[in-house]
Image: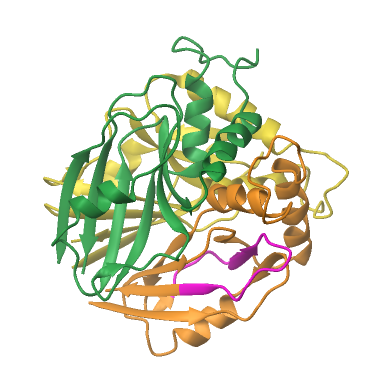
Chain colours: A green, B yellow, C orange
Amino acid sequence: MIKQKEIVLPRFRRGYHLIDYIIEEELKGFLPETGLLHIFIKHTSAAITLNENADPSVRVDFETIMNQLVPEGQNVYTHTTEGDDDMPAHIKASLIGSSITIPITNGSLNKGMWQGIYLCEFRNFGSSRKLVLTVYS
Amino acid sequence: MIKQKEIVLPRFRRGYHLIDYIIEEELKGFLPETGLLHIFIKHTSAAITLNENADPSVRVDFETIMNQLVPEGQNVYTHTTEGDDDMPAHIKASLIGSSITIPITNGSLNKGMWQGIYLCEFRNFGSSRKLVLTVYS
Amino acid sequence: MIKQKEIVLPRFRRGYHLIDYIIEEELKGFLPETGLLHIFIKHTSAAITLNENADPSVRVDFETIMNQLVPEGQNVYTHTTEGDDDMPAHIKASLIGSSITIPITNGSLNKGMWQGIYLCEFRNFGSSRKLVLTVYS
């Protein structure tokens, strides 16, 4: 059995944001006993990942290190019309990925204790991001 | 219900290539109303991702920046027998990933407007790459 | 139909390790004719990927290059209380990813000839890592 819904996130500023509270609210009464949840982001300059959910300094360092990995404003870029943050955002989106899949066990997301769902917003002024949530059972 | 098919892509030169037209042709009459499509590449020096489908300069910059991230010919490499492009190709393959999963909604791939399916060919002279397409509904 | 099991891996030292033999043992009698296998790691400083399964030098170079990409001990890190290897481990975990999905065809994992399942242990002294295996058919 498949259930699916498309949601629009509130706008987030550039950076790494825990969105578990949004996903869990959207999935209320939606989760089967056993299955998989697929979270898909319909954008090419933002991404979805799982990472540490306790210490906000982890999300700060994500911003620093991802910018170090894919620096803005290098003169090697040819795709520059949408601003210095645009092409690095595309690269980061493919490095991190556009979807995650999480097991569902006993009616709950079976993540590790420290795993939170991150929205990674790579643009300075990103739009409201759309997600598709698909649940399999 | 599951449907699955294995396909062989035409040979692509090193770089980033939109293959939506191939995937869509292979999926004609194959897509359910609601579900998920899993695209898997059976190789360790090529990858599959979703990224910007409009401006070819994005794919040019992908080649530049991924080579900057994982430079060829550094003397730290020990796996060198298959050429300077081989070990960086393996690293890139795991950074980008060997599969993507895309939601199917109303009988179509529910990607964002700007999301195209990229074959990432990391070898100078890669073989014809094999994909496994699996559709769940 | 869905089948799911949670397993605990033996402790691995920091580095990249083939774990096909463990996964295959756990999946004995578990695989359908056609389907998908989802392997999920419940941690934020280790990852799962597919890569070259033949030459151990590939796994050596993975360690070298991933450390080059995300160096330890830089003074830009703010999340430092758990040691120099901790924050880089988080970044690497999101670059590589917390799960892989592999097609099942004719009752077997339909990987490429050279694709092995890697546990990527990014910590100097990681714990026993937990995986959730989910099989769809």
Rendered location of residue C126, percent (x, y): 66, 68
Q: Decide which of A109, A78 is in the foreground and name it.
A: A109
Q: Considering the image in quadrants, where does the C terminus of chain B appear?
A: bottom left
- Extreme residue toward the top, this view: A81
Total marks shown come to 0
Q: Is residue C10 above or below residue B63?
A: below
- Extreme residue toward the bottom, this view: C29
Q: Find residue B134 and report its image quarter.
A: bottom left
Question: Taking A57 as reference, is B6 left or right?
Answer: left
Q: Is residue C100 magenta?
A: no
Q: Decide which of C4, C31 is in the foreground and name it.
A: C4
At x 42%, y 54%, the residue is A116
Rendered location of residue C36, percent (x, y): 35, 68
Q: Considering the image in quadrants, where does the N terminus of chain B appear?
A: bottom left
Residue B87 visible within the image: no
Q: Is residue B127 above or below residue C14?
A: above
Question: Taking A31 as reference, is C73 left or right?
Answer: right
At x 26%, y 58%, the residue is B135
Q: Decide which of B107, A5 is in the foreground and name it.
A: A5
Residue B89 visible within the image: yes
Q: Decide which of C33, A109 is in the foreground and name it.
A: A109
Question: Taking C54 as reference, is A20 left or right?
Answer: left
Rendered location of residue A6, percent (x, y): 18, 43
At x 63%, y 36%, the residue is A65
Q: Is residue C121 magenta?
A: yes
Rendered location of residue C90, percent (x, y): 59, 51
At x 25%, y 54%, the residue is A24
Q: Find residue A17 and report its image quarter.
A: top left
Q: Which residues are magenta?
A: C109-131
